Amino acid sequence: MQKANDLHITRRHFCKSAIAVGATLLASKTAYAADNAASNTMKGKPMPITLPELPYAQDALEPYISANTLSFHYGKHHQAYVTNLNNLIKDTDLASQPLETIIQKTAGDAAKAGIFNNAAQVWNHTFYWHSMKPGGGGAPKGKLADQITKDFGSYDAFKDAFKNAGATQFGSGWAWLVLDNNVLKVTKTPNADLPMAHGQKALLTMDVWEHAYYLDYQNRRPDYITTFLDKLVNWDFAEKNLG
Ligand code: MN
């Protein structure tokens, strides 16, 4: 957390308005798009993409996801995507753009795969941290629960689809709950790929790269997936994204 706090304070030092944005930082996809827009275009001068703060302490998801995993996954992997992206966009037209614009402008462009991969991984990880919370897990309530029942038949049917997507994503990637033309769907994407590159709105994600679970679960990806759903999933975040 210390490193993230330092970055956050640095940004506040440069732009007071970031504090207002920061108050709702990452409460929703929209909020963090706005934050990135603010953080790298202050005073008309391109600012680097920053590593957003984790929404909880690094040990807050224990015993399900260890502080050791988060220290590497957030502090090393997520940070590396931020650093790589800033190096790749430095002195280019993309340096002054919000993160989501960088993703949209490079998706499907083989010549810009490195920028897309790092930008999408910055976005995906921030979204993933918010897709979990201490004391999370179990079935959703309210509007989202109703729509899950309508579109999947039952919460159990959703769970089966989500578990299957995570378990069958061959190699690295992500499992998602998305809104596609106003219908909820479970999808999986390889590597850094993400719903916004396919015209879908992300509601929730689960990282199934090995670095997400290997220190805690070794090869038992299905156990990590079950734990994600039963103990960690943040339905408040997903419902906010539903709008
Ligand atoms: Mn990851």
Image (spheres, helix red, strand yellow):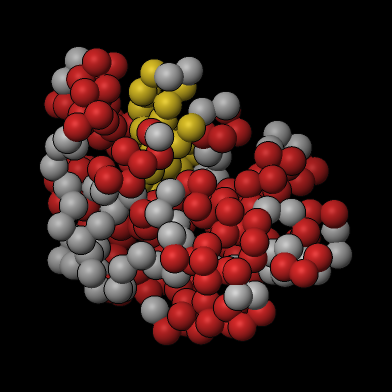
Counting from the top left corner in percent of width and height, residue 10 is at 59, 82
Q: Is residue 11 left or right of residue 202?
A: right
Counting from the top left corner in percent of width and height, residue 99 is at 64, 53
**Is residue 87 in view?**
no
- Identify the residue at image location x=41%, y=30%: 178
- Identify the residue at image location x=40%, y=34%: 243
**Is residue 97 in view?**
yes
Q: Is residue 46 above or below residue 148?
A: below
Q: Is residue 13 above or below residue 156?
A: below
Image quarter in which the N terminus is found: bottom left
Q: Nearer the viewer, residue 64 or 103?
A: 103
Q: Quadrant of residue 164?
A: top left
Q: Nearer the viewer, residue 71 or 209?
A: 71
- Identify the residue at image location x=69%, y=64%: 40
Counting from the top left corner in percent of width and height, residue 110 is at 75, 39
Q: Quadrant of residue 198?
A: top right
